[in-house]
Image: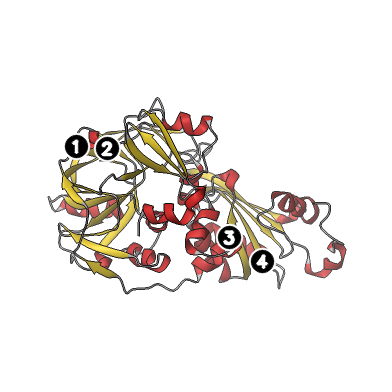
Amino acid sequence: MNIRNAIEKLAKNVIQIKQELKHDEAVEFILKNKYEKTPIILNVEGKKVAMNFASSRSLLCKYMEISERDFAKYLAEIKINNNIKIEKDFKLKEGTVNLHSLPILKYFKKDGGRYITGGVLIARANDAKVTDPKSYNCSIHRLMVLNKKELVARIVAPRHTYMLWKREIEREKDLPIAIAIGVHPLCLFSSATRLPFGMEYYYSNSLIKNFKLYEVDDMLVPDCEILMIGKMTGRLENEGPFVDLTGTYDKVRKQPVIEIEKLYMAEDPIYYAIIPASSEHATLMGLPYEPVIYKAVSNVCDVKNVVLTPGSRHYFHAVIQIRKITEGDAKNAILAAFAAHTSLKMVIIVDEDIDVYNHEEIEYALATRVQPDKDVLIISNIRGSSLDPSAKDGITSKWGIDATMPLSRKQDFERVDKLCI
């Protein structure tokens, strides 16, 4: 199961563009034609480039065949399937290593270079068992092209890829890696989800029917269109500048160099790209936190739904629907949410009758059920997200809003209907 299966699943909803674009014209074309959330296959210098197949909650739910409103609950309660099929019949053909032969995009004028953004970086320790799926960490990193055979990877401490790399470098070894491009969108989603080490393949196996792994060059890899095998070295080079989630430029840093040793491709391969700061970027980065928050809040009250809002890039603001049983449930839910997703900046708690997908209803709850001096909780001088430009050195303030009805006065809030919304 890879990107071709997603294309087949969406069928008529996929747009295919015959007009040939240069590698630095894709973003302008997408924005000009308002295709930012549309699953699309571009013609970039004569090669296929797929985009936006994971650009919304709706698309992810179509692949999983669930209701959008069940998204957080479904993933919070999903049973992990540990029975993964491992095969050796890998069908991609080996070719000459030449990154310049791939339709790797340059997204914005000030970018440090051409970037791989839609690849899954797969890493394992040198002494880990090759055939054990738990040996592997899968994640998405921006990868800047240095030359025909080398990339620079942006890795963040102390996340799993960084810790694996640091451990091997301290042992004076390189970190074995693979980069899979053109995987199934749910495999991208799994790789973007914060999971215990070694669980990404099992999570993908739980989300995707007929998920398989292939043993290639002492690595286990998923079905894909393009596969690179190599090593992450201790050599550091400048990476960036590059546009981050908020649409602002991240700074230049010294980051590790990846040396590509082998390149495998399908016949007429479909390359996959994620536009920085796009809806797809926000969806993959933020929505995996909804089930995490759901589980955390369920420990302190009766949670009904969790939504990370699109205006906050599906990352900084959450609206949480609860069934309030005792006074204080809402504030406990606020604190649980902040603990579950430390990059959250605002949490709004609403009652069961408020539609968390309807911004007018949320504003209605704020207008009619909140007394700011009693219902707004502000936490100062706390670590937040490094992506928030308003924070200083990662230190920010956060606010939680209890927009629920007082239990003793519920009759005062009864609505005849929702015609006014």
Q: Earlier in the sequence, mark 3 or mark 1?
A: 3
Image coordinates of residue 278 in percent, x first then y, are: 49, 40
The spot of residue 84 in percent (x, y) is: 30, 71
Calculate the distance from the C-alpha at mark 1 to the C-alpha at mark 4.
53 Å
In the rendering, which numbered label is found on residue 322? 4
Residue type, mark 3 in image: Glu
Q: Nearer the viewer, mark 4 or mark 2?
A: 2
Which residue is most to the top? 109
Q: 85 or 313: nearer the eye?
A: 85
The residue identified by callout 2 is: 102
Question: In the image, is residue 181 above or below residue 248?
Answer: below
Residues marked 2 and 1 touching at CB (< 8 Å): yes
Tell whether 165 sits left or right of 392.
left
**Residue that label 3 marks:** 68
Question: Marks 3 and 2: in contact by CB < 8 Å?
Answer: no
Q: Which of the pair 135/39 is nearer the observer?
A: 39
Q: CA distance from mark 2 to mark 3?
A: 35 Å
Residue 196, horizontal then vertical, whole percent: 36, 64
| Circle 1: residue type | Asn
Query: In screen coordinates, is 234 left or right of 82?
Result: left
Tell me what residue is drawn at x 40 percent, y 43 percent.
50
Whichever of labels 2 and 3 marks the residue nearer the N terminus, that label is 3
Q: Residues within 10 Å of mark 3 (few under 14, many from 20)?
A: some
The disc labelled 4 sits on which kind of residue? Ile
Check disc 1 and report the residue beneath it: 98
Q: Earlier in the sequence, mark 4 or mark 2?
A: 2
Q: Nearer the viewer, residue 340 or 377?
A: 340
Q: Residue at x 37, y 63 (%)?
A: 204
Q: How is the image coloured?
A: secondary structure
Mark 2 vs mark 1, CA separation in Å:
8 Å
Residue sitting nearer the eye, 201 or 314: 201
